[in-house]
Structures are given as C-alpha cells and as structure tokens.
Amino acid sequence: MRAGSLRHRVTIQRYELVVDEYGAPLRRESWKDVATVWASVDAVSGREFFASQQVQSEVTHKVTIRFRPGVAADMRIVHGGKVFGIVAPLPDNRGTRLVLMCREVSYEQ
C-alpha cells in the first residue's frame, strides 16, 4: 500500500452507552475515539430522496486505511466535520489494508 494515497486524517469512533449513577441508560449519544489514522476517502455514489416529508441526502464513500483489527460495522468515521457510518469493513487477503464501505446521511427540515 502506497502511503501517498492515504492523505486524509480520519477518526474511528465506537458507540458507548451512557448510564446514570444507578446504571440506567441515558438518552444521549456518546461516541468514544478509538484511533486517528491516515486514510483515503473516495466518494462512490450519491442520491437524494424524499421520505417522511424530509429531504434526505445519502452519499456512499469508500474509506481505505491500513489494516487495523477490531474495526466493525457498529463504528463510525469522522472526517472534516462529516460523519460516516461503517456499513462493511472489508480486509484484503494479505492483511495490509482495510476498505470501509461507509454511508453518510444528512437530514434537512
């Protein structure tokens, strides 16, 4: 894998359940940074559609990073103020890189 193609700095995050002092889950999102790595971020396709009387934009991206064990589909990528949910982590056969198929969804009211 050529290092020159990894020109974007991205942060991998994992969802953590926030609980109160009694152990009851609170209704707010809490994402913890797992790692900040160099990556190649490429747009694959995009589309816009209407649902629930809202315009929703969906853009699918391919994020390529060096192989890192433990990256799963319940994590997300943060890059340049945008958030990408990981749909499928796809390792190569040699164990040198990991291709993350991601989805960004933005809602406008």
Image (cartoon, rainbow, N blue to C red):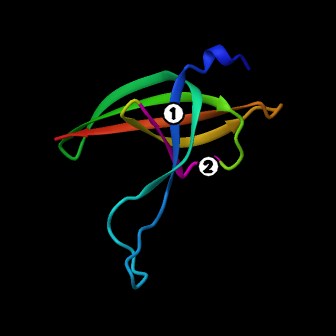
Q: Give the extent of the magenta segment.
A: 71-79
In the rendered structure, the answer to whether residue 15 lies left or right of residue 49 reads right
Whether residues under marks 1 and 2 lie with C-beta atoms below 8 angstroms apart, the answer is no
Q: Quadrant of residue 79?
A: top left
Residue 59 lies, in percent from the top left, at 41, 29
- Marking on residue 72: 2
Q: Is residue 14 above or below residue 105?
A: below
Residue 57 lies, in percent from the top left, at 31, 32
Q: Quadrant of residue 4?
A: top right
Tell whether position 75 is magenta. Answer: yes
Q: Is residue 67 above or below residue 6?
A: below
Residue shown at the point (56%, 19%) measured from the top left: 7
Quarter placement of the N terminus: top right
Residue 83 lies, in percent from the top left, at 41, 39
The residue identified by callout 1 is 10
Quarter placement of the C terminus: top left
Q: Residues within 10 Å of mark 1 (few under 14, many from 20)?
A: many
Front residue (pair 104, 2): 2
Front residue (pair 8, 46): 8
Q: Residues within 10 Å of mark 2 (few under 14, many from 20)?
A: some
Tell whether position 104 is magenta. Answer: no
In the rendered structure, the answer to whether residue 39 lies left or right of residue 54 reads right
- Marking on residue 45: none
Mark 1 or mark 2, earlier in chain: 1
Q: CA distance from mark 1 to mark 2?
A: 16 Å
Residue shown at the point (45%, 66%) measured from the top left: 17
Residue 43 lies, in percent from the top left, at 47, 22
* Amino acid type indicated by mark 1: Val
